[in-house]
Image (cartoon, rainbow, N blue to C red):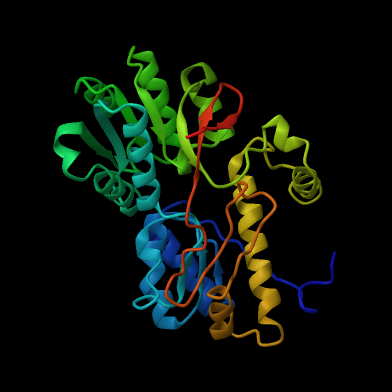
């Protein structure tokens, strides 16, 4: 509608990898070798991105704004063609446990985590936040595989550990299962859910809002269900975009806000690239984003990148689910 960017139209080719790393490799090879794409933009998943990272760096094809907060994607020296977008899982884990210990100094922790770089990075952050208290505070840690049908047995084991606080490091399907199972078994721990599993539409509603009320998370984009957010021009612009270009999208789903924000970041990079639209210059400009403020980011959060730090977002804000919306937690 705007005539493209710098006079160029964008051709977006979207292939489904089924969230399977082997399929990701197959589809990305097709995009690079048959379609000769400029970049692989916003590929989803820690394991899927890990499977293509070396290949894309050897080929010198941008793996730009990866949808994962794993630290392996912020490694400019070893992987100069890979850049994340989500905040670091390890940093979020540190922030989570620091808040928990401040709110509940005698907390006994149980941790569920996905058995890949996502879960392990987050767990590393939890351990770093606890320091020498790890062994005394954590009563149980259990991992699950993305191929598992449910995490029910893991939740029963975590409940049996005697923990009174639950850190839920899971993607939406498993995060919802864990919340539901914990509640239905009579376990009522103080709960923190990782940002990747915090969508109201994809997690809280499927789990049951009565089971989800009171859960804490770290947020970096605005909650599109919040009446206060809905009063703003930024929300109105986003909702109008959704209605026009993605009418089948769920206006309650945080992931649609994230996708919108990542796309805006990519547009900024393309604008900065100007007429020098090479893969090399694309990465150069992606690593030169300064104080970029996006309309649907949480207030106070801005994007900055540099040649030695590819992490666009450096922080999250603590939020509590009140049964309908995410509300800012006052420290």
Which of the pair 174/226 is nearer the observer? Answer: 226
The correct choice, above or below, for 273 with respect to 238 in the image is below
Q: Is residue 222 left or right of residue 216?
A: right
The correct choice, above or below, for 234 with respect to 225 in the image is below
Q: Is residue 129 left or right of residue 88?
A: left
Residue at the left extreme, as displayed: 135
Q: Is residue 136 left or right of residue 220?
A: left
Which of the pair 59/29 is nearer the observer? Answer: 59
Residue at the top extreme, as displayed: 186
Which of the pair 144/18 is nearer the observer? Answer: 144
Q: What is the quadrant of the N terminus in the image? A: bottom right
Residue 239 occupies which quadrant of the picture? top right
Q: Position of residue 139 (x, y in %)?
A: 18, 30
Q: Position of residue 104 (x, y in %)?
A: 32, 26
**Residue in the image at 48% along x and 69% along y:** 28
* Res 9 seen here: yes
| Total residue callouts | 0
Q: Position of residue 290 (x, y in %)?
A: 59, 69
Residue 187 occupies which quadrant of the picture? top left
Q: Position of residue 92 (x, y in %)?
A: 40, 47
**Residue in the image at 46% along x and 78% along y:** 307
* Res 12 seen here: no
């Amino acid at each position: 509608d705007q005539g493209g960017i710098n006079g160029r139209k964008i051709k977006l080719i979207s292939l489904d990898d089924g969230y399977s790393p082997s399929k990701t490799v197959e589809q990305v090879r097709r995009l690079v070798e048959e379609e000769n794409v400029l970049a692989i933009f916003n590929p989803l998943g820690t394991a899927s991105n890990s499977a293509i990272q070396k290949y894309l760096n050897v080929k010198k094809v941008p793996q730009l704004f990866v949808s994962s907060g794993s630290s392996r994607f912020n490694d400019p020296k070893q992987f100069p063609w890979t850049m994340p977008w989500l905040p670091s899982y390890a940093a979020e884990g540190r922030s989570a446990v620091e808040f928990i210990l401040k709110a509940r100094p005698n907390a006994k922790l149980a941790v569920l985590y996905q058995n890949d770089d996502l879960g392990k990075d987050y767990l590393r952050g939890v351990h770093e936040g606890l320091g020498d208290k790890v062994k005394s505070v954590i009563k149980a840690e259990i991992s699950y595989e993305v191929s598992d049908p449910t995490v029910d047995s893991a939740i029963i084991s975590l409940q049996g550990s005697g923990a009174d606080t639950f850190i839920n490091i899971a993607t939406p399907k498993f995060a919802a299962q864990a919340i539901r199972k914990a509640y239905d078994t009579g376990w009522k721990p103080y709960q923190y859910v990782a940002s990747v599993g915090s969508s109201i539409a994809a997690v809280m509603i499927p789990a049951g809002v009565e089971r989800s009320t009171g859960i804490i998370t770290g947020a970096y984009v605005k909650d599109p269900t919040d009446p206060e957010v809905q009063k703003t021009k930024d929300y109105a612009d986003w909702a109008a975009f959704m209605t026009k270009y993605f009418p089948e999208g769920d206006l309650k789903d945080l992931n649609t806000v994230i996708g919108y924000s990542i796309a805006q970041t990519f547009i900024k990079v393309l604008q900065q690239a100007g007429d020098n639209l090479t893969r090399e210059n694309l990465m150069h400009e992606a690593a030169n984003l300064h104080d970029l403020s996006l309309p649907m980011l949480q207030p106070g959060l801005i994007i900055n990148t540099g040649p030695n730090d590819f992490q666009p977002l450096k922080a999250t804000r603590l939020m509590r689910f009140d049964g309908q919306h995410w509300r800012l937690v006052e420290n």
